Image (cartoon, rainbow, N blue to C red):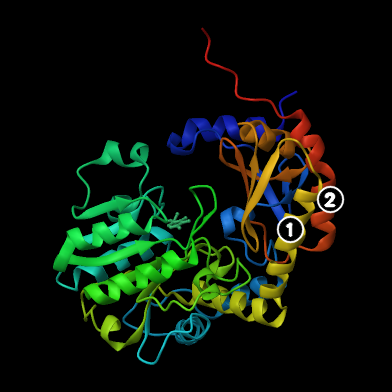
Amino acid sequence: MTTHTDELLERYRAALVPVFGVPQTVLDHGDGCYVVDVDGKRYLDLLGGIAVNTLGHGHPAIVEAITKQVSQVMHISNFFASRPQVELAEALLRVCRAPEGSGVFFANSGAEAIEAALKLTRRTGRHRVIAMEHAFHGRTMGALSLTWKPAYREPFEPLVPGVSHVPYGDPDALRAAVAEAGDDLAAVLLEPIQGEAGVIVLDEDYLRLARELTRDAGALLVLDEIQCGMGRTGHWLAHHATDVVPDAVTLAKGLAGGVPVGALVTYGPHVTGLLQGGQHGSTFGGNPLACAAGLATIRTVESDGLLENAAAMGRALTEGVLALGHPRVAGVRGRGLLLAITLTEPVAASAMTVAREAGFLVNAVAPDALRLAPPLVLGPAEVESFLAALPGVLDAAVPPSSPAS
Ligand SMILES: *Cc1c(COP(=O)(O)O)cnc(C)c1O
């Protein structure tokens, strides 16, 4: 019997550019932390659209904000301003703890926020940017120049020149690269937690060192918080766990709870003044619809105590997974609700499939790691149901079949 899923995936194959491979299933609707596919199968969504659905699916605050804004005005161009745009910028500056004279540039995606950051670094009059090995910053040509993975980069070379990659978390390598770039160093750009690389948390001392070295070199420290920011770690921004103050931060993913948006936040008047009138822009960036969704997201995170919830549910998941004592669990890394369950064998891809069949959406972020980035509204009952299912999932997972010999 052909299911609706099979039928739609067949049509997907025939109609879409195959850059994502064949999707796992076809989702139809969602409610809270759950999504339902076109054949009516229900899943606990522990991936949250890859750290996007901050408030889960169909949250009344988002539905109401968007519905109201759509009927009021959806788009006006940047020749005009709107109240949601101004209010979201103000709210972002507040939650980012940005000092007086800071600013926000709105884009529509993470890669676009990174493009804005890259253009900002050029305005220092310098050309060299130090990024990190295993970094992910997006797929547009500028963002790709900062992204590390050779398989993503090499088909598209030559990329933007001047970028070098240093081992993530290695202080000596960073010192050497900063010294080598000399007075052409425009910026060090890094993720406080590398998401796509497998949820790798950067050492706090390294972040402080990056701050000191860039300050001394007269260069910018740009933090990519597109995945780890907006409350996910239990702090508004992941780097708020430290005393480091960056020069710029990029945001996207969870910022508007599922509506496409990106933002570059520039810290203080000097950095904010680097981009002058006419030097950057975006048709859709800062549109009232996305900004209304962003505002509703921030207000709900605050009113519903979701930073505290992210921290508490992250602890419950981490402790619960470790307490299983399952032989295939090596550990849990990450912060708050950005976690990776590390495995003793490369069975993550199979575990993801088995979990989905059992009604749980997780992501095999590496051959030996399962990423969880659920909505911040995740509750104890959802944590319990996942912990109850995980041993069976791990038991049933099999290593990838070896290539035919
Ligand atoms: C997802 C991601 C990006 C790119 O965002 P897009 O919206 O996919 O362009 C950039 N940086 C980090 C850290 C990300 O996780």
Query: Residue at coordinates 79% horizontally, 63% vertically from top-left?
Result: 379
The reply to whether residue 127 is in sight is no
Closest to the camera, between mark 2 and mark 1, is 2
Image vertical order of residue 3 relative to residue 102, above or below:
above
Task: Find the residue positioned furthest to the front.
Answer: 172
Secondary structure of residue under mark 2: helix
Residue beneath label 1, please?
33
Query: Residue at coordinates 32% horizontally, 52% vertically from top-left?
Result: 166
Specify whether 125 is left or right of 95.
left
Specify whether 315 is left or right of 230.
right
Gap in angstroms between the C-alphas marked 2 and 1:
12 Å
Residue 361 at x, y = what percent? 69, 45
The reply to whether residue 79 is in sight is yes
Task: Find the residue positioned furthest to the bottom.
Answer: 100
Residue 39 at x, y = what percent? 75, 39
**Ligand 1 sits in quadrant:** bottom left
Specify whether 351 is left or right of 91.
right
Residue 399 at x, y = what percent? 64, 25
Q: Is tag 2's residue or tag 1's residue first in the polypeptide sequence?
A: 1
Report whether the residue tagged 1 is closer than 8 Å to ligand 1: no
- Packing grade of label 1 (10 A; few <14, some 14-19, many >=20) is many
Residue 165 at x, y = what percent? 30, 51
Query: Residue at coordinates 44% horizontally, 76% vertically from top-left?
Result: 244
* Amino acid under disc 2: Ser
Image vertical order of residue 400 relative to residue 361, above or below:
above
Image vertical order of residue 148 relative to residue 85, above or below:
above
Residue 313 disc label = none
Image vertical order of residue 211 relative to residue 381, above or below:
below
Quadrant housing residue 113: bottom left
* Amino acid under disc 1: Cys
Secondary structure of residue under mark 1: loop
Residue beneath label 2, please?
385
